[in-house]
Image (cartoon, rainbow, N blue to C red):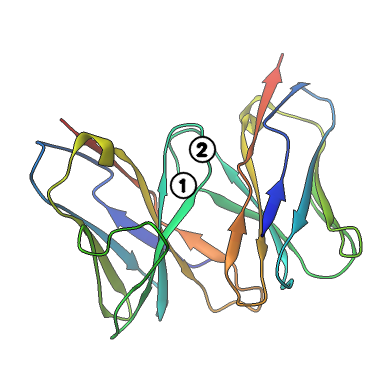
Amino acid sequence: GAVVSQHPSWVICKSGTSVKIECRSLDFQATTMFWYRQFPKQSLMLMATSNEGSKATYEQGVEKDKFLINHASLTLSTLTVTSAHPEDSSFYICSARGDTDTGELFFGEGSRLTVL
Amino acid sequence: GQNIDQPTEMTATEGAIVQINCTYQTSGFNGLFWYQQHAGEAPTFLSYNVLDGLEEKGRFSSFLSRSKGYSYLLLKELQMKDSASYLCAVMDSNYQLIWGAGTKLIIKP
């Protein structure tokens, strides 16, 4: 199956700093990638849809100036959490739709962010 | 609105069979997915149903009834490693995935 790699897996940062998370499709081209946030014991919450070469589409309630998404190539999307605060601490996961007929999503390993 | 319902938590015994139900109300339907998610890890794909009926894949089977807005995931010969959350997700008419909150499955020896 298709492989999506996410980096870093863990990150701890001080309040007020910015953190960048990378999501790469290793063996296929991903025109569209999805960014999710998951708080403990809750389901995935779609934050935004990242489209190669164009602006991301954010879900209602997600601040686009705080969560910057860049999808500069068909294999790389980045999420930057700007001026992070403790309430931004969460598990961030990216996914991309592979080129299968089912539209199956392939997920990155996830990035656990802890803001002190 | 769009809604996916599945039980919050279930407990089963090693070696037994368990059925996790999912009911949905969405704007259109382009398939239903089941994903497995171990604590602290990303979800992994289990199954996809777009037509009514049962899809079997090893110890796991998934069933869909579109007229009832209902699906279930059946796990046979349960193993301790099956302890995880199981997420039901429906792709709506806009090809967006609507996620359920997940069912935490606890396997006891």
- The quarter of the picture where the N terminus of chain B appears is bottom right
Q: How many marks?
A: 2
B98 is higher (above) or lower (below) than B38: below
Camera-side residue: A80 or B11?
A80
B84 is higher (above) or lower (below) than A33: above
Which residue, as the protein is rendered here, is positioned at the far top?
B109
Amino acid type of disc 1?
Ala
Does the image show residue B15? yes
**Residue B40 image position (x, y, % from top left):** 43, 35
Q: Chain of mark 2?
A: A
Camera-side residue: B89 or B17?
B89
**Residue B79 image position (x, y, % from top left):** 70, 28
Left or right: residue B35 versus residue A87 is right
**Label 2 element class:** loop
- Mark 2 = which residue? A42
Q: Residue at x 91, y 64 (%)?
A: B67
Q: Tell me the crowding category of disc 1: few under 14, some 14 to 19, or many 20 or more residues within 10 angstroms, Cα based.
A: many
**Residue A8 image position (x, y, % from top left):** 23, 49
Marks 1 and 2 sit apart, C-alpha to C-alpha, by 13 Å
Q: Tell me the crowding category of disc 2: few under 14, some 14 to 19, or many 20 or more residues within 10 angstroms, Cα based.
A: few
Amino acid type of disc 2?
Gln
- Mark 1 = which residue? B42
**Label 1 element class:** loop
**Residue B84 image position (x, y, % from top left):** 60, 33
Camera-side residue: B32 or A88?
A88
Left or right: residue A93 versus residue B102 is left
Q: Residue at x 63, y 29 (%)?
A: B83
Q: Residue at x 62, y 41 (%)?
A: B102
